[in-house]
Image: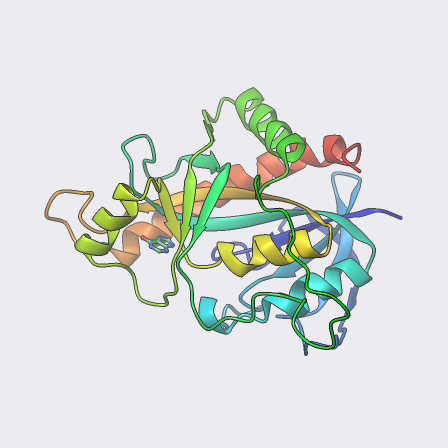
Amino acid sequence: MSFTAIIGGTGLTELKNLDITHKEMVNTPYGSPSGPLTFGKVAGNDVVFLARHGHRHTIPPHKVNYRANLWALKEAGVKRVIAVAAVGGITKSMWPERIVIPNQIIDYTWGRSQTFFEDDLSFVTHVDFTHPYNQELRQILLSSASELQLNPYDGGVYAATQGPRLESIAEVNKLERDGCDIVGMTGMPEAALARELDLKYVTCALVINWAAGKDGDNIISLQEMEKYLESGMAKIRAVLEAALPRVVDVV
Ligand code: HPA
């Protein structure tokens, strides 16, 4: 069986449209994943769901065991990963509630275990990361969201910051000068670890706030973020339902 995994982020600790068949607590050489792997079907399609921040949203971005998460999914027979992520919008087309399917990423995180290739090596390994996201999966998410009239943004650079705090205005301005369009805290090392394990990986991002300084003098309101999370995640669930039957062809 070749499974599709959905890694749910903030606002998506469970998949309401998932008919659960069983859950598995697994262990890996890198420790425990964020929670059990939840197997089931979304609209008839086999999926494995994993809540990145834990079932009760208790694991902050810098404490997520990304290696255990990806390793557990690979061991379960997963071939492709759809990573859902809430982000801040930096450039002008990245307004709150917009769905963005980024095509590039810059890593600003530090101190996270970011590779499987470090101990007991027989040779040093460098994986190609020219295109961090799988292009076929990107196109499927984009067409699924477009058919639902959701006006997704095609492309954009994801800035992966350390968190858990949000950024200062100067930091966001720097990210913008670097060419970043959206900012989140979990995109790395997740994308790179997926590549190391030869998993096809795509990010489905939902903008839930303007990044610091991008909304006039307003500071970021957690209440507003939650509002956009709730309405936006309903859209993401619809996109996933539409996309899942099509992604099985990506092998
Ligand atoms: N910055 C970093 N991560 C985020 C943001 C943000 O503004 N919004 C949601 N995740």
Q: Quadrant of the C terminus?
A: top right
Asked whether residue 60 is in view, the answer is no
Q: Is residue 190 above or below residue 249?
A: below
Asked whether residue 173 is in view, the answer is yes
- Camera-nearest residue between 22 and 1: 1
Numbered disc total: 0
- Toward the right, the furthest residue is 1
Residue 132: which quarter of the image? top right
Q: Is residue 50 above or below residue 103?
A: below
Q: Is residue 17 above or below residue 94?
A: below
The residue lying at 57 percent from left, 69 percent from top is: 54
Q: Which color scheme did the rendering employ for the protein?
A: rainbow
The residue lying at 50 percent from left, 74 percent from top is: 63
- Camera-nearest residue between 151 and 228: 151
Q: Position of residue 67 (x, y in %)?
A: 64, 67
Q: Position of residue 88 (x, y in %)?
A: 34, 48
Q: Position of residue 179 (x, y in %)?
A: 33, 39
* In-image side of 3 versus 220 (left or right): right
The residue lying at 57 percent from left, 58 percent from top is: 190
Q: Is residue 237 above or below residue 6?
A: above
Residue 114: which quarter of the image? bottom right
- Toward the front, the furthest residue is 123
* In-image side of 33 versus 169 (left or right): right
The residue lying at 48 percent from left, 27 percent from top is: 150
* In-image side of 199 versus 166 (left or right): right
Q: Position of residue 62 (x, y in %)?
A: 46, 70
Q: Quadrant of ligand 1?
A: bottom left
